[in-house]
Image (cartoon, rainbow, N blue to C red):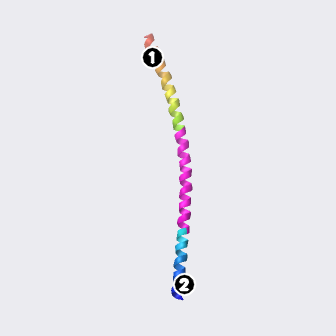
């Protein structure tokens, strides 16, 4: 009977460890999803910034060309 009880205890322990692993994987997955959405938002902001920077540089170049033409 002791062997069967030991085996049952080991099986229960394995299931407990598997449940904990599954929970940890779920937590990691949710964290990755959250981080991914934050990264996407930051990339979108960076893209907007780059577009604004390009427009400012374009205007600056035009003003410099006009100054150069007047000189």
| Residue 44 placement (x, y as % from top left) | 54, 39
Q: Which residue position is annotated with label 2? A: 5
Secondary structure under tag 2 reads helix
For the residue carrying disc 1, how many other residues have a C-alpha within 10 Å: few (<14), some (14-19), or many (20+)?
Answer: few
Q: What residue is shown at x 49% (from left), y 28% (from top)? A: 54
Magenta stretch, main secondary structure class = helix
Distance from the alpha carbon under mark 1 to that under mark 2: 89 Å
Task: Determine the residue positioned at 48% across, 18% down.
Answer: 63
CB within 8 Å, label 1 to label 2: no
Q: Where is residue 68, by image quadrant? A: top left
Q: In the structure shown, which secondary structural element does the residue marked by tag 1 occupy?
A: helix
Q: Pick whichever of labels 1 and 2 is earlier in the sequence.
A: 2
- Assign the N terminus to one quadrant of the image: bottom right
Mark 2: few/some/many CA within 10 Å (<14, 14-19, 20+): few
The residue at which mark 1 appears reads as: 65
In the image, the segment drawn in magenta is: 19-44
Query: What residue occupies the far bottom of the structure in this picture?
Result: 1
Q: Residue 71 in magenta?
A: no
11, above or below 41, in the image: below
Mark 1 or 2: in front is: 2
How far from the left and from the top, in percent, is residue 35? 54, 50
Query: Farthest residue toward the top?
Result: 70
Depicted 14 relative to depicted 52: above or below: below
Task: Check the picture and name the quadrant holding the C terminus.
Answer: top left
Q: Percent from the top left, x then y, of residue 17? A: 53, 70
Magenta segment includes 25: yes
Tell me what residue is drawn at x 51 percent, y 37 percent. 46
Front residue of 7 and 28: 7
Mark seen at residue 48: none
């Amino acid at each position: 009977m002791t062997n069967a009880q030991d085996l049952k205890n080991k099986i229960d322990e394995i299931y407990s460890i598997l449940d904990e692993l599954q929970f940890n994987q779920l937590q990691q997955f949710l964290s990755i999803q959250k981080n991914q959405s934050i990264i996407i938002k930051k990339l979108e902001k960076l893209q907007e910034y780059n577009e604004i920077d390009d427009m400012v540089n374009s205007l600056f170049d035009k003003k410099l060309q006009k100054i150069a033409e007047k000189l």
